[in-house]
Image (cartoon, grey):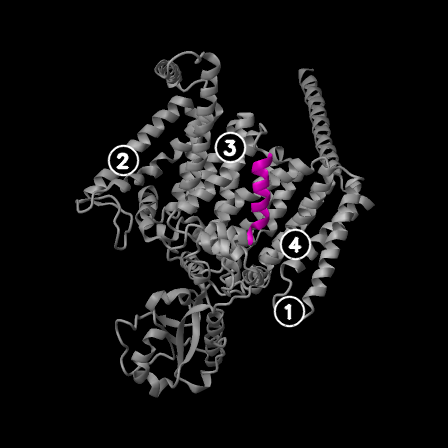
Amino acid sequence: MNRSIRLQFMTANKMLFDRLNRQILADMIYRNIDFFKTHRIEIVSYFLLIIIAATMRFWDLGSRALHHDESLHAYFSWQLFMGNGYIHNPMMHGPLQFELNAALFYIFGVTDFTARSMYAIFGVVLILCPLLLRNKLGQIGSFSTSLLLAFSPALLYFSRFARNDIFMAVWTFALIAFLWRYLDSGKNKYLYGSAFVLALSFSSKESTYFTVGMISLYLVSVLIYRTMRRLYSQHNFFGISIFEALCKITKTLFFKLYESRSLSNISRETVFLIVMWTVSLPLWSGFIALFQLEGSNFILAAKTGSSIGSPSGGGLVIAAIVIAIAFVIAAIIGLRWNWSVWLRCALLFYVPWLLFHTTFFDNINGAGSGLWQSLGYWIVQQGESRGNQPVYYYLLLTTLYEFLPLIISIIAVIYYFKKRDPFARFLIFWSLATFLIYTMASEKMPWLLVQITLPLIVLSGKLLGDCLKNVRAVNLINLKNISIVSLTLVLIFLLWRLAFLGIDESSNNLSMLILLVLGLLLVLCGFLYVKTQVSYTHCAKLIGVTIGLILFVLTIRSAVLATYKNGDIPVEMLVYTQTSPDVPVLAKHISDIALKTGEKPTVDVDSTSGFQWPWAWYLRDIALAGYPQYGDHLPSGTMEQQVLIIHSQNQLKIQELIEENYGEGQRFRHRWWFPEQTYRNLSLQKIFTSLVDRTAWRRAMDYFIHRELSNKLSSEDAYVYFDDSDMRYFSPRELE
């Protein structure tokens, strides 16, 4: 009897459980259907945008010649894939990109295309990141941000470039998204996410120190501002001396700090600071290398040699002590705050960080280099001022390529000046702080424009979302609005023609001037008439939107030119000391030799001026290559290599030694670069002079629109020699 009752009870429970499961599943399906119905336009828009963005990032990805830096990253990723391991070297930044590339090589094979594919993937992921801040940016603001990210010239170009800057854009965005989600909700999962993203960021590039410093400065500023407001509301400072006011403030702050010693009941900003700093504090240990004494035996960061940035001698002892102290302080603060949450954050930070830096425990020394040398190396290298660019370099690049988010961001600063919107204020702070940090840093390179562009685009998306959230497209399509847009387009065209009237033209300028002035008067009359039908604000918004759409079209054009037409031709300022297209053509020619003869040809590449790169990548499979430096050691008279690639400055030295066996060499560009004399040594006087010089306007517009330069491109050349006359057919670009 009891058994029968139990069976009936179990059967009833099972039926009830199955019914509940079916109900839950049905509810989930209905909720998803309802969500899709409600947001179908948004979902379809994102889907189409991702398809377009992915196509732009993967299209013809392997055709452009690999840059010097790209070849380094690809080659050592290939070495790791081949089982030769990887040793963390701060000169090439964090190890994560090499390990991800090696995994991609394992899955899809080793090609120029796959060498850049991981970066293209992250470029697509970045476009989805605004969804993490959808509650802050709004529906329109989030999509606007994604749209600007998708077509940004800098972000598109460096999404197709084998450097980890696009990784950093994703990690920075994710970290800031987790910050604001935690400030809004207080949920620990966002602290865990922040710790994990920090580990990935520190494993990618040392610019993470800038990111952590920038976020910390903002949070500390918020805490100081909030404390000062509370002090002002609690105390009456009128009618007392400055000394008495300072005493009151000091006393209140002292008791506030004393009460907070237990780290309980602290603000969310303080909690985020605790997590961010305690998990990463040991990685800041190398910062004390700034204070090493010249000539002492305590070398905290070597300035030369194979281990630049590493401690040696007594410096090793100091480094070990500082790192240990940092670990102890971090653990004490973290455990005292909330031991369970902090331990999870620490594990989520140090487990991936340790795995990546030691290449999954294949290179144990990577833990030490990550803790000290990563920061020590770049402290030492600050004196090198790589790029040696003027202080206005990023302002020039931003104006040239990211003019749309720059203009919208300037408007956003004005728009949010008196509005109490903490998130908008943070975006303004992020944009200004990032621009100032990279402007002040000694190393200035075009790929760092990625970090400057990112906050400008998010701030632009925020403004667009707030201004357009109540606008409906259906309501915009009417005769009045079409008239305003048409008048704006005609006005811009007439002003453009008037600005360049008489420059390089043989037509009747007086007649054209009269026509242009009459046209302007008619357009102004049209605006005055429309003004009587609509409000001034509505008219101004439509004019702004029209100009914005024009600038957006120009942005797309700029992105297409830089990425596809001039991807390895340095008429673009984004193209920095780029490998010439002649190099992959010559590499293909050498590969064809291997196919014809059935044997791998022997090749010597003169490594003068770093010419080993990108040849080490291009010749990884198709040649038995050597990399002597002919500037120091001349080759013997009996050369047995089938192909010689000689730096142009050494060509005359060895011409007599090899001309009998190799004949005449062919000159080609090895690397070339933008004529930087066009923008160096600018001054306020030169700028003001060009503002009233219409010929200077024409030169500027010729470059802005058509990328036409008045100066020739600079290059560093090489000669190629073949020991077989049948192999000598090689067609480099014609040298100017």
User: Can you tell which mark lies on residue 322?
Assistant: 2
Whether residue 412 is in magenta: the answer is yes
| Of the pair 360 and 693, the residue shown nearer to us | 693
Residue at left 34%, top 85%? 659
Sequence-wise, the earlier of marks 2 and 4 is: 2
Sequence-wise, the earlier of marks 4 and 1 is: 1
Query: In whole angstroms, how far apart are the C-alphas of marks 4 and 3?
Result: 34 Å
Circle 2: residue type: Val
Query: In whole angstroms, how far apart are the C-alphas of marks 4 and 1?
Result: 27 Å
Query: In whole angstroms, how far apart are the C-alphas of marks 1 and 3?
Result: 58 Å
Helix, strand or loop for disc 4? helix
Q: Nearer the viewer, mark 3 or mark 2?
A: 3
The percent position of residue 463, horizontal first and vertical second, equals: 62, 38
Q: According to the image, label 3 marks what residue?
A: 179
Circle 3: residue type: Leu
Circle 1: residue type: Glu
Sequence-wise, the earlier of marks 4 and 3 is: 3
Q: According to the image, label 1 marks what residue?
A: 505
Circle 4: residue type: Val
Residue 18 against residue 109 in the figure, above or below: above
Q: Main secondary structure of the magenta part?
A: helix
Question: Which contiguous range is marked in magenta?
Answer: 401-415
